């Protein structure tokens, strides 16, 4: 399945979670619900996936974790904040670079319009 096909399914799952729960909950609630929805769609999903950081040929134990990794292909970073800042976008781009993945989605569930709160990020590799 291509990244675009996965992205379409993931977006549908995000909409299901948002329509059922609405805004204002903790990120951990949205993450758990989204993992549930993705698995209902028969997707391979891992949450809180460690990301190694290699610096000077050494792996640094820094504790970076992807919120959700779908089909070992698409990163989903879940937020529930008043406002998405530039640093949130940079975080996803950095996670893409560190993991060698091509596509990431940044989603802010604390929004009055979820369709405007899903941001697609691409790693040029």
Image: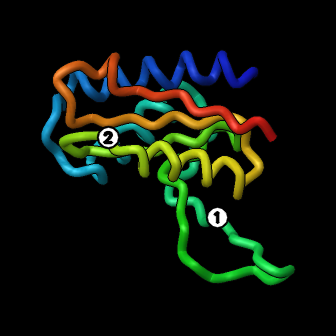
Residue displayed at 23% across by 45% down: 81
Task: Decide if residue 109 is on the left or right side of residue 9.
Answer: left
Residue displayed at 18% across by 31% down: 21
Task: Decide if residue 21 is on the left or right side of residue 87.
Answer: left
Which residue occupies the foreground of this view, 84 or 20?
A: 84
Please say if 49 is above or below 61: above
Pointer 1: what residue?
51
Q: Name, please, the residue furthest toward the left.
A: 24
Quadrant hosting residue 103: top right
**x, y (%) of residue 33?**
33, 40
**x, y (%) of residue 3?**
70, 25
Give the structural element (helix, strand or loop) at label 2: loop
Q: In which quadrant is the C terminus drawn?
A: top right
Q: Residues within 10 Å of mark 2 (few under 14, many from 20)?
A: some
Task: Decide if residue 66 is on the left or right side of residue 59.
Answer: left
Q: In which quadrant is the N terminus drawn?
A: top right
Closest to the camera, between mark 2 and mark 1, is 2
Residue displayed at 41% across by 26% down: 118
Quadrant hosting residue 17: top left
Q: Residues within 10 Å of mark 1 (few under 14, many from 20)?
A: some
Its colouring scheme is rainbow
Which residue occupies the foreground of this view, 73 or 56?
A: 56
Please say if 56 is above or below 30: below
Pointer 2: what residue?
84
Residue displayed at 71% across by 51% down: 97
Report, in whole angstroms, how far the alpha carbon at label 2 lies from the one at label 1.
22 Å
């Amino acid at each position: 399945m291509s990244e675009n096909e996965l992205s379409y399914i993931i977006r549908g799952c995000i909409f299901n979670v948002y329509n059922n729960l609405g805004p204002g909950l903790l990120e951990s609630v949205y993450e758990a619900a989204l993992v549930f929805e993705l698995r209902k769609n028969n997707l391979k999903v891992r949450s809180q996936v460690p990301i190694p950081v290699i610096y000077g040929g050494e792996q640094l134990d820094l504790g970076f974790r992807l919120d959700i990794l779908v089909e070992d292909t698409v990163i989903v970073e879940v937020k529930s904040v008043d406002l998405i800042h530039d640093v949130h976008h940079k975080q996803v781009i950095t996670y893409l670079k560190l993991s060698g993945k091509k596509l990431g989605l940044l989603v802010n569930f604390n929004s009055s319009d979820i369709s405007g709160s899903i941001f697609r990020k691409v790693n040029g590799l």
